[in-house]
């Protein structure tokens, strides 16, 4: 095979890949039974309740860092406490408390109950989460910024993709897998990001400890490799190829 025929073959390969890419059809908006598609660009304004309907209470977990304040009690103001790996914490006069799986409000009530038993009259307890370690989602694969991200309130797959700064150059958006463990059993679901964007089905909710894996698109890699090769044809690569294919 001479250099001219090699170049011709590569041109055909690139052309085919670009043609396939150009022929990809844009998904039609709608399909999710919970989505109403309006024949106008104007959407109704949300009410106050709409901003609260998507919230999810935070549950304290192992290694979370809490700030506990007992109003007007010397030595118990603004104490920073880390939950241990077993989900327990120790607080002066209240002893050891099992706080894993409780909301900050429930932890407040638990501490107040213990303090009342020590003759502190009507203790006013406030618990805030300073550092959330247990409630995280892992994002891996073809995203711009893989890593561990806190799950604050209610988060969806598109929101998780956004906090990871979006898909990478070679992301296969038809092959995004969410792994989840429920009652000791592992589950996995494959999602199509473009279909979700077009409202074909609902944007799935992501929970703490989920793993989101964005697949790799080999066709995109091949296209880039071939285009990179063509961009170098006028350089030293021409000499090297000419010597190899005589």
Image (cartoon, rainbow, N blue to C red):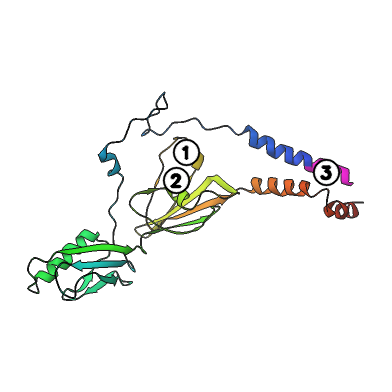
The answer for how far apart the CA atoms under marks 2 and 3 are is 41 Å
User: Are dots 1 and 3 in contact, CB under 8 Å?
Assistant: no
- Residue 84 versus residue 144 in the image, above or below: below
Local crowd size for mark 2, using a 10 Å CA cut-off: few (<14), some (14–19), many (≥20): some
Q: Which residue is mark 2?
A: 158
Quadrant in the rendering for residue 62: bottom left
Left or right: 207 in relation to 168: left
Assign a secondary structure to mark 3.
Answer: helix
The answer for how far apart the CA atoms under marks 1 and 3 are is 39 Å
| Residue 1 in view, yes or no | no
Q: Which residue is mark 3?
A: 7
Left or right: 82 in relation to 115: right
Q: Which residue is mark 1?
A: 197
Tell me which numbered mark, 1 or 2, is placed earlier along the sequence. 2
Assign a secondary structure to mark 2.
Answer: helix
User: Are dots 2 and 3 in contact, CB under 8 Å?
Assistant: no
Local crowd size for mark 1, using a 10 Å CA cut-off: few (<14), some (14–19), many (≥20): some
Q: Position of residue 209 (x, y in %)?
A: 39, 59
Q: Position of residue 236 (x, y in %)?
A: 84, 54
Q: Position of residue 120 (x, y in %)?
A: 9, 71
Tell me which numbered mark, 2 or 3, is placed earlier along the sequence. 3
- The stretch in magenta equals 1-10
Q: Residue at x 44, y 50 (%)?
A: 160
């Amino acid at each position: 095979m001479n250099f001219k025929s090699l170049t011709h073959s590569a041109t055909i390969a690139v052309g085919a890949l670009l043609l396939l890419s150009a022929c990809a059809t844009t998904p039609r908006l709608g399909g999710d039974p919970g989505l109403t598609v309006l024949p106008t660009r104007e959407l109704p304004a949300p009410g106050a309740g709409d901003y609260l309907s998507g919230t999810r209470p935070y549950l304290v977990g192992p290694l979370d860092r809490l700030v506990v304040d007992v109003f007007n009690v010397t030595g118990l103001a603004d104490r920073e406490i880390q939950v241990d790996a077993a989900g327990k914490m120790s607080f002066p006069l209240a002893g050891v408390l099992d706080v894993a799986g409780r909301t900050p409000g429930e932890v407040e009530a638990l501490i107040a109950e213990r303090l009342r038993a020590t003759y502190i009259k009507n203790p006013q307890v406030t618990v805030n989460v300073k550092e959330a370690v247990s409630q995280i989602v892992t994002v891996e694969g073809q995203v711009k910024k893989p890593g561990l991200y806190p799950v604050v309130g209610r988060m969806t797959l598109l929101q998780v993709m956004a906090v990871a700064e979006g898909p990478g150059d070679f992301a296969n958006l038809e092959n995004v897998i969410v792994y989840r463990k429920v009652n000791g059993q592992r589950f996995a679901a494959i999602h199509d990001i473009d279909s979700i964007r077009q409202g074909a089905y609902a944007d799935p909710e992501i929970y703490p400890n989920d793993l989101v894996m964005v697949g790799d698109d080999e066709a995109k890699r091949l296209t880039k490799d071939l285009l990179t090769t063509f961009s170098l044809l006028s350089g030293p690569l021409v000499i090297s190829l000419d010597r190899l294919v005589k």
